[in-house]
Amino acid sequence: MKIGIIDNDTLALEALATRLNYYDKYNISWTETSGKSALHIFFDMHKYVDVILIDMSMEDISGAELCRSFRKRSSSVGIVAITSFNLITYKESAIRNGAQAIVSKSDIKTIMTSLEYASKGQSYPPQSQFQNANDSFLRLQHTPEPLIMLVTLREAQILDKVVLGMTNKEIAEALGIGEETVKTHIKSAMHKIGAANRVRASILWSTLGDDYFEHYK
């Protein structure tokens, strides 16, 4: 069984890969701490796998968006969401965005069981709210992209601070990133939410932002 793992926690990623590699039936084809890199590896470099384990607390692209991106472009790959938080936190989002299961990172036994089901495109547990890979693929083909799904987690964090009236310099210092990086994220976010200027972005996000983290969790 070929497996890909996406987790921005390097230690957790290495630990999970090591534990699964102990078993001959698992082949860890690739691991990534970046969601963007994982999408590139799978779709552009064609390094396909049977199942992808996706941490729901990713930063560059949220776990929810990653699940959705893989599922909308593949009807066959199994998707298992993993988290170190209570499963309830991300369960609905995992279901909504095309995963076949959600499992605690520390529960290796259940991860292995879910891999067996997901590798065949099946949901786990059976008869649960999770859909199989093909059914969730078909559903998402006819589901419009919510506006907030286009905004990355970092862009959302910056927009939150724009709403508070913080300057680019203040935002950069608060987040520990460069001022030019802040400008780039703001420009990208404004385009995604249809804001012509910073004031309009602040007004729009003061409403959209209330739903953002609820949608992604």
Image (cartoon, helix red, strand yellow):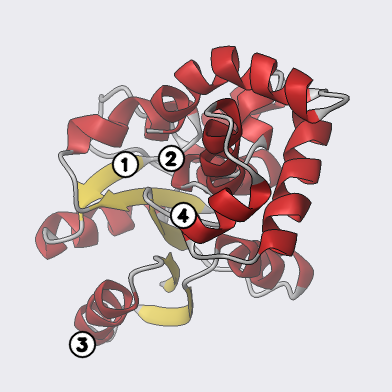
- Tell me what residue is drawn at x 25 percent, y 25 percent: 127
Label 4 vs 1, first from the N-terminus: 1
Q: Position of residue 130 (x, y in %)?
A: 35, 29
Rendered image quadrant of residue 189: top right
Residue 22: assigned label? 3
Dots 3, 1 in contact, CB < 8 A: no
Is there CB contact under 8 Å for labels 2 and 1? yes
Question: What whole-number distance in Å separates the C-alpha atoms at marks 2 and 1?
Answer: 6 Å
Residue farthest to the right?
196
User: Marks 3 and 2: CB-CB under 8 Å?
Assistant: no
**Element at label 1:** strand
| Left or right of 71 on screen, residue 96 | left
Is 117 displayed left or right of 39 in the figure?
Answer: left
Residue 111: where, in percent of width, then height? 22, 58
**Three-letter residue code for mark 1:** Ala
For image coordinates 54% across by 68% down, the residue present is: 34
Residue linked to disc 4: 174
As helix, strand or loop, the secondary structure at mark 3 comes to loop
